[in-house]
Image: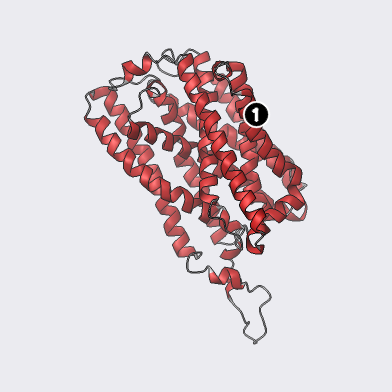
Amino acid sequence: MEFIFSKRAKITFVALMLIGVLAIIYGIFNGGEHGHNRLWANIFVNGFFFFAISIGALFFLALQYATEASYMIVLKRVIEGITQFIFIGSGILIVFFAAGTFHLHHIYHWMDPMVYIEFLEDGSANPLYDSIITGKQAYLNQPFFWIRTILYLGVWSYFAYLFRKRSLLEDAQGGTKLHFKNMTSAAIFLVFFAFTSSTASWDWIMSIDTHWFSTLFGWYVFSGIWVSAMIFLVLITIYLKNKGYLPSVNDSHIHDVGKWMFAISFLWTYLWFSQFMLIWYSNIPEEVTYYITRIEHYKGLFFGVFFVNFLFPMIILMSRDTKRSIGYLITVGVIIFIGHWLDVYLMITPGSLGHLEFGFIEIGMFLGFLGLFLYVVFNAFTKAPMTVKNHPFLEESEHLHI
């Protein structure tokens, strides 16, 4: 069945973007002394969050290929559609990083060349000199940063393009040749992603708090990426099925996606607590600095996000029936979708601003990016039939029953 991107849906998504822009403009004129950095920090919060959903969907798609899982085949076009935001998201991130390189914002303190100069030309001590950042210069320098960033975005985008291209070819050609090629490519991608998802989180997010480091941070960010993708997959699947575009999707498929949302929420919780507990217990100054800022200025939000993202899935989605209930899945999905957006906000904003800032800029940026993300994804759905053809496991997927 061909997906029809209705005029009403287009107007809704464009309206979201326009409302977001208006809220941002209002917020800028009332943003106070931190308005400039605050604007750029929010661009990164939302640019990364929605990009993370698409890269999380790509990871999940590759996982299905590599494991030859059959149950998600009827949802393959939905997952592929979500991955298509990778190209737009990559462009937004490149603009943000380029702005830092040209000193249009100061989110990354290590990008300021003055922090590496110990003495000024007159022989006096440079007050901006930072010995800790200087000690990390071999890794945190702009040429190496850009090489890594282009590598991450380029390879991830290539695999998103490759899987989509082969999926459409499979509809026309049939057979198993393309399927086995995708298996091999997925295995290569998963190995690459296992490493680069962590290093990208170090480069893009952890380096905002340049004095701080955590060996669990890469896995923690990865779990947030994965669960955010599963939340969106649940919500968009329910919407499309309700509109009649996924006739082969039954309660068992929705149950399976709901189980993923439930399970990865526990993975995220485990990594959040493990990172926090180990750093708090050891009480090493260069590690606790990250949490001091967040607990001093964001305490309620910081612990609130943890309990919301943990308790709602645990209490509500524990039973089999609730993972098949549209009402429960939508309610929990929307709540923890916002919860994980706030988690990204808490990873980026304190290191950028040092204190709590939340108002029209934050709300407007979220709505604007949400409208853009939905527009891109829904437009991608129009480029191919919503039901795949000729996949070797299609029939098995259509008859899934648990």
Q: Nearer the viewer, residue 391 or 251?
A: 251
Looking at the rendering, which quadrant does residue 340 occupy? top right
Q: Nearer the viewer, residue 194 or 171?
A: 194
Q: How dense is the environment of label 1, judged by Cα within 10 Å: few (below 14), some, or many (20 and up)?
A: some
Above or below, 255 against 225 in this view is: above
Relative to 2, 30 lies left or right = right
Identified at 45% across, 58% down, the residue is 146
Residue farthest toward the front in the current orientation of the protein? 281
Q: Position of residue 140 (x, y in %)?
A: 51, 64
Above or below, 73 against 137 in this view is: above
Looking at the rendering, which quadrant does residue 181 occupy? top left
Above or below, 218 against 50 in this view is: below
Looking at the rendering, which quadrant does residue 8 occupy? top right
Q: Position of residue 30 (x, y in %)?
A: 78, 47
Identified at 72% across, 47% down, the residue is 28
Residue 303 seen in this snapshot: yes
- Give the residue at mark 1: 312
Q: What element carries label 1?
A: helix
Residue 356 seen in this snapshot: no
Identified at 46% across, 16% down, the residue is 252
Colouring scheme, one of rainbow, by chain, secondary structure, one colour: secondary structure
